């Protein structure tokens, strides 16, 4: 009697050993679909976080730049390479500059610490975008310490005897055309362009190195969703996304991306830079 009841119980409640092969494949397929849906969202969230971090760094540097001028009767900090910075060293033999060195070759942050702005914020981290994964001399060993440069039109030559002097602003009060809200100061520069302290660009009326008007002198970063981060003389910070396919393609090149031709006569990205640098500068 007991044996019969036991048999009935077993037959009424069969024990399963686990998933069948088909069930397991279905579960794996569902996980794969969910992963493919979540990864792009996570990637975008990470990119936004890095961009926000970079924006914060620019705000800190911009504040240092403003405080320096406040402490020096409105005069901007020098923005010229000092000796020891590489192939263009020795431009300024006297005085200090916002930083020394060469982002491509510097092995540590010593040159950042020697810069005239460092005393206003003693964090070398604000000089580098967290999304910048480049290494010293592109050897894949030491991370670079800087990704930020300053517009050459912000006191690139402080000596009145320099031929470039009349093309630069020297005091914050000089910035009128365009206005401080449109004149950029710091920019996140491309890893295959950045070297010394200044970011070079043509203006609508004045061209460097005998280039055509529609030429990239230095090249901006493209790591923020095909865009970069800039700060402006009034203190605000912007993210710019590039509009021209040509800009995006240059950013993908493996060699140095300096003195690169833009889209002649209608490059919307270069036009933005023309609108963010001097149109006319009074000499003081």
Image (tube, rainbow, N blue to C red):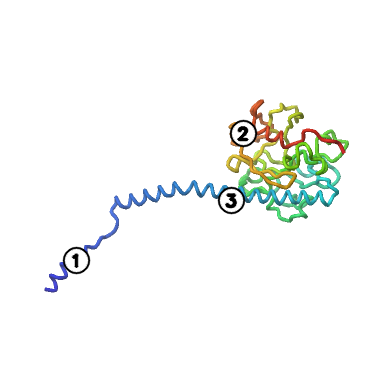
Nearer the camera: disc 3 or disc 2: 3
User: Would you name the residue on which mark 1 appears?
Assistant: 10
Question: Nearer the N terminus, badge 2 or badge 1?
Answer: 1
* Nearest to viewer (mark 1 / mark 3): 3
How many residues crowd around disc 2 within 10 Å: few (fewer than 14), some, or many (20 or more)? many
Q: Residues within 10 Å of mark 3 (few under 14, many from 20)?
A: some
Question: Mark 3 or mark 2: which comes first in sequence?
Answer: 3
Establish if 66 lies above or below 13.
Answer: above
Which of the numbered marks, if any, corresponds to residue 247? 2
Q: Residue at x 29, y 50 (%)?
A: 22
Helix, strand or loop at disc 1? helix
Q: Position of residue 96 (x, y in %)?
A: 82, 47
Q: CA distance from mark 2 to mark 1?
A: 72 Å
Q: Nearer the viewer, residue 196 or 268?
A: 268
Please tell me which residue lies in front, 197 or 274: 274
The first of marks 1 and 3 along the sequence is 1
Residue 197 found in image quarter: top right
x then y, percent, for residue 138: 63, 43
Q: Report if residue 143 is visible in the image.
A: no
Place of residue 17 in the rendered image (x, y in percent of width and height, measured from the top left): 27, 60
- Compute the Cα span from label 3 to label 2: 24 Å
Label drawn at residue 207: none
Q: Residues within 10 Å of mark 1 (few under 14, many from 20)?
A: few
Camera-side residue of 68 and 10: 68
Task: Give how far apart the Cα atoms at labels 1 and 3 are.
Answer: 58 Å
Asked if disc 1 and disc 3 are in contact, CB closer than 8 Å, the reply is no
Mark seen at residue 49: 3
Report the number of numbered marks.
Answer: 3
Q: Quadrant of residue 262?
A: top right
Q: In the displayed structure, does residue 50 sit left or right of residue 284?
A: left
């Amino acid at each position: 009697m007991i044996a019969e009841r036991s048999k009935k119980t077993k037959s009424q409640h069969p024990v399963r050993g686990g998933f069948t092969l088909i069930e397991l494949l279905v579960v794996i397929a569902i996980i794969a679909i969910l992963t493919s849906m979540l990864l792009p969202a996570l990637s975008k969230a990470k990119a936004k976080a890095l961009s926000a971090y970079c924006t914060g760094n620019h705000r800190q540097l911009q504040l240092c730049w403003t405080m320096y001028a406040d402490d020096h009767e409105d005069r901007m900090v020098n923005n010229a390479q000092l000796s020891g910075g590489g192939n263009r060293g020795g431009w300024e033999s006297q005085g200090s500059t916002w930083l020394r060195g060469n982002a491509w070759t510097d092995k540590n942050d010593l040159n950042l610490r020697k810069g005239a702005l460092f005393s206003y914020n003693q964090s070398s981290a604000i000089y580098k975008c967290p999304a910048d994964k480049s290494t010293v001399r592109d050897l894949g060993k030491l991370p670079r310490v800087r990704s930020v440069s300053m517009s050459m039109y912000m006191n690139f030559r402080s000596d009145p005897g320099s031929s470039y002097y009349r093309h630069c602003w020297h005091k914050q009060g000089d910035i009128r055309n365009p206005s401080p809200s449109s004149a950029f100061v710091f920019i996140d520069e491309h890893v295959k362009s950045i070297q010394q302290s200044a970011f070079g660009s043509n203006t609508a009326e004045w061209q460097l190195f005998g280039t055509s008007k529609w030429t990239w002198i230095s090249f901006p970063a493209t790591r923020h969703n095909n865009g970069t981060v800039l700060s402006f003389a009034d203190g605000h910070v912007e993210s710019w996304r590039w509009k021209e396919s040509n800009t995006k393609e240059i950013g993908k090149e493996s060699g140095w991306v300096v003195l690169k031709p833009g889209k002649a006569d209608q490059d919307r990205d270069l036009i933005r830079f023309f609108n963010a640098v001097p149109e006319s500068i009074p000499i003081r």
